[in-house]
Image (cartoon, rainbow, N blue to C red):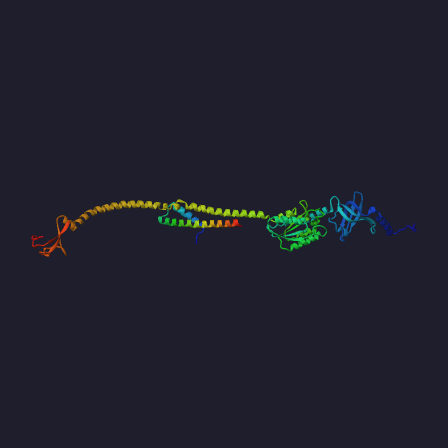
Amino acid sequence: MLEDSRLLTVSQLTDHISRAIQANPKLIDVTVAGELSNFVHHSSGHMYFSLKDKDCSIKGVMFQTWNRRLPFVPQNGQHVYVRGDVVVYKKGGNYQLNAYAMEPAGQGALALAFAQLKDRLAAEGLFANERKRPLPAYPRRIGLVTSPQAAALQDFLVTASQQGWPVDFELAPAIVQGERGAASVVAALELLYSRQLDAIVITRGGGSLEELWVFNEEIVARTVAASPIPVVSAIGHETDFTICDFVADARAATPTAAARLVIPDGRRLASELARQRRRLAAAVAALVDSRRSKLDHLASRPILSRPLQILLQPRQNLDLGAYRFKTVFTRLLEQRRHGLGGTAARLADLNPISVLGRGYSIVRDEKGIIKKISQLMPGKLVTIQMQDGQAQASILAVGGDGDGTEI
Amino acid sequence: MEPKFEAALARLEEIVDSLEAGDADLEKALKLFEEGISLVRVCDKQLKEAEQKLEQLNAQGEED
């Protein structure tokens, strides 16, 4: 028996088995459904695992070449579809599944990858509300990251121009789909980070999860999170959410919504301004009016509008005083006049003219009144004054005792 | 220098109150009245200026 011509080495036998398996089309490029266990992502970069169902188990390996493309992180207990070839691991003497693709069962790989990255970044706090910066109320320069050919850009610009607010745009063109997308979007963002901008808008039209995948890539999410400028993310339609949306400072459902979000409504601002101006004018006018009415009120107080009132009391006092004075004075005057009566009569008696009334006459010459006979001589012309007139006379003779005068 | 409007108005009110009370002697009353009339004039002038300025500014505002 030891000389049996069919004696084989272990290697020969293993080769036979290996070839037999490789020759079987049912074991080549198969897709196997199973639950992951013993999963190890080795430091070499390769992934090792077992795939099992209720009764059986098969070892598996996914080399780095392949697992590099895996969007999600496989986990023990996960139900997956693994596609690969059955091969013999000659050194270990066992067969295994050489996997080149893996997908979570039940949901797509991308959906799972999305959920996993979202959970991880959320745990890091990258979506936290405290990180979100307010958008500038009155932006002047806005950066745009999008595909220059995309309808999204047109939608955004049309709406922006209708806002009635002057704003400049800086477009950083990017590939927004496919394998080169993430690097392109990152480069575009980093270009804009060096510019003086008030806000950055990343936008892209709607698409499938695969088409929007660029915006679920970790490198894009982290670049957005590191932005020195507030970022608005407007990827896809209302129902599409991307990791980029979560990490951005603000999310807009569509490119059009992004334009309305980031650019103020110029007409509303103008009417608000007009309203404030009217308030201002009304407030100042009210202030002036109230002063005016207070002044008018004061000025029309009787004391100022009929100022003679001030003099009323003094006038009354004066009138009373004057009346009393007059009364007293009149009486005084009467008394005086009365007292004066005798004196006046006496004074009248002294008037020489009044003596003439009693029959006396006054004789004058050119020098004055003749008081002595010695002042006369015959032939002298004299004037005789009586009470009602005078006469010229010539002296006929002069005697010692009043006779011998002749006219 | 003209007094500030509010100060002038307050003084005017004081004067009117005092005159209405009628407790000032004639000479004092006349002095107060004179001061009051001059305050009315000052206040009125300041208000007219303010009103004109307002109209002017409003007109400018409408043109913008």
Q: Taking A36 as reference, is B18 left or right?
A: left
Q: Is residue A262 visible?
A: no
Q: Is residue A110 visible?
A: yes
> Which residue is at 33% across, 46% downward?
A315
Location of residue A56 (image quadrant): top right
* Image spot of residue A74 (x, y percent): 74, 48
Counting labels gives 0
Q: Residue furthest top?
A: A54
* Image spot of residue A297 (x, y percent): 43, 45
Q: Nearer the viewer, residue A145 or B2?
A: A145
Q: Taking A68 as reference, is A351 left or right?
A: left
* Image spot of residue A78 (x, y percent): 75, 45
Q: Taking B17 as reference, is A231 left or right?
A: right
Q: Nearer the viewer, residue A233 or A75?
A: A233
Q: Nearer the viewer, residue A389 or B22?
A: A389
Where is the N terminus of chain B found, in terms of image quarters? bottom left
> Which residue is at 45% across, 47% downward?
A292
Q: Nearer the viewer, residue A118 or A26?
A: A26
